Each structure stands twice: as C-alpha cells, then as structure tokens.
Image (spheres, rainbow, N blue to C red):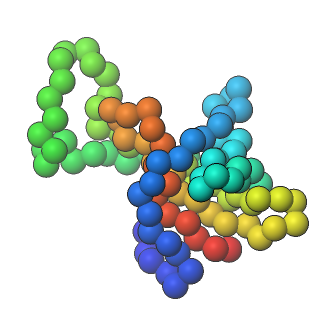
Amino acid sequence: MTAVANETALDVAVDVRFTPAGTPLAVWHEGRIWAVAADPVRWFARDSWWDTRRTAAVGSGDLVSIEYWRVQVRLSSNSALRTFELRRDPLSEQWLLESITDN
C-alpha cells in the first residue's frame, strides 16, 4: 500500500461484527461503533513462514494465509466516510486495524 498524507498507520486490536453471510457489518474502535457503509473488499496475503520459523503439527490447517478486509465506515449517516484496513493473522482470532484513510 502506498502511504498518502491522509492515512494513519496503526496496528491496534479491534472488534469486528459480521453478518450471517460472513461480511463485516461494524467495527468497534476507540469506544465507538463504526458502521460499514459500502461493500467491503476481502483478500488474502501469504505470510513469509520462512522468516517467522513457525512450526505446526501435521493437519493444523492453513498457517500462512493472512486475511484482509477493506471497509468504508462511518459513525452516523451524515458523517464522513473513512476507510479501515483490517487484518487477521492465521494463528489468531483477533482482528487488527492496520490503517485508516480519510476519503
């Protein structure tokens, strides 16, 4: 990702609520609920396991796919949109807010 003047790089834990279909519905960040206001975008990246030297038992599952969501969120129907980039590492259930961009 290319850094821009209105982007804040973070790496903080957040709570993400999902729809029954598995897409983000809202993000709890700094004591506020940010509602998802547009279709979120999901992708996966691969962890460089050779650098982390993580080992796992046979049959442990996918240990290298990092899940990402880019969501446009707002606090209320008349507030400005912001873009949150969320990340979940393969060995964690915790979501991290990786960056915030003002639209």
Q: Is residue 103 above or below residue 55?
A: below
**Number of numbered discs overlaid on the protein picture:** 0
Residue at the spot 13% in from the left edge and 48% down from the top edge: 51
- Return the x and y of residue 52 as percentages of the image width and height: 16, 44
Q: Residue furthest front?
A: 31
- Return the x and y of residue 66 as percentages of the image width and height: 38, 43
Q: Nearer the viewer, residue 66 or 80?
A: 80
Residue at the spot 83% in from the left edge and 59% down from the top edge: 76
Q: Quadrant of the N terminus?
A: bottom left
Q: Residue furthest top?
A: 59
Residue at the spot 67% in from the left edge and 66% down from the top edge: 82
Q: Quadrant of the C terminus?
A: bottom right
Please identify the quarter of the rendering in which residue 56 is found.
Answer: top left
Give the side of residue 62 with respect to residue 67, left or right.
left
Q: Residue furthest bottom?
A: 5
- Return the x and y of residue 69 as percentages of the image width and height: 55, 49
Can see residue 40? no
Give the side of residue 36 with respect to residue 55, left or right.
right
